[in-house]
Image (spheres, helix red, strand yellow):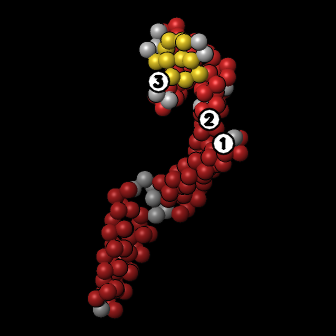
Amino acid sequence: MNVLKAVLSAIAGLAAALIAYSAFFVRGDLGGVMGYLRARGALRRLREDGTPEQISAAQAQLHALGQQVGDPAFAGQLIPLALLVGTLVAGLVWWAFTRRQQGAPRLDIQERMVYRLAHRLGGHFTLDDLSARSPLTEEQARAATARLLDLGRLTRDGDTFRLS
């Protein structure tokens, strides 16, 4: 599980760093980016039925717009900040998964597993059925059925449990 946690944390961190770098590259000017994309689409359509002069003028305009929107020198200076953002996001993802794994198992989930198995088996089941056909261990199955018996949601007939 640690390998998956590390891979997911790395992917999330690298993605966050790339997004931060991209935002720095365009100085947060989303309107400028959209204008550039619209101009690029217009150039693509112009290439289909435009004259060579129109196409070269549109390419020059697109290049000038790209120079206005993007600032590679500024983005290059802020690479350490983008990497810091990525590291923080990776750490946050790692912490979230570690915290989730270390927490106590939720009792309501175990009770739902008991209910699902009982419904699949027509309302009657044994502890052997529960531990064999669900992800619960034998002691978790005993604890879940004991809680449901105390709450009055199950009744016991010898070794068999029945939904109330």
- The three-letter amino acid code for the residue at tag 3 is Gly
Measured as percent of width and height from the top left, residue 80 is found at 63, 50
Q: Earlier in the sequence, mark 1 or mark 3?
A: 1
What SS does tag 1 mark?
helix
At x 59%, y 31%, the residue is 134
Q: Are marks 2 and 1 in contact (CB under 8 Å)?
A: yes
What SS does tag 2 mark?
helix
- The three-letter amino acid code for the residue at tag 1 is Lys
Residue at label 3?
Answer: 123
Q: Earlier in the sequence, mark 3 or mark 2?
A: 2
- The three-letter amino acid code for the residue at tag 2 is Phe
Residue at label 2?
Answer: 97
Q: Quadrant of the C terminus?
A: top left
Quadrant location of residue 84?
top right
What SS does tag 3 mark?
loop
Camera-nearest label, 1 or 3: 3
Is disc 3 surrounded by few (<14), some (14 to 19) or many (20+) residues within 10 Å?
some
Q: Earlier in the sequence, mark 2 or mark 1?
A: 1
Measured as percent of width and height from the top left, residue 69 is found at 42, 64
Nearest the camera: 61 or 39? 39
Residue at label 1?
Answer: 5
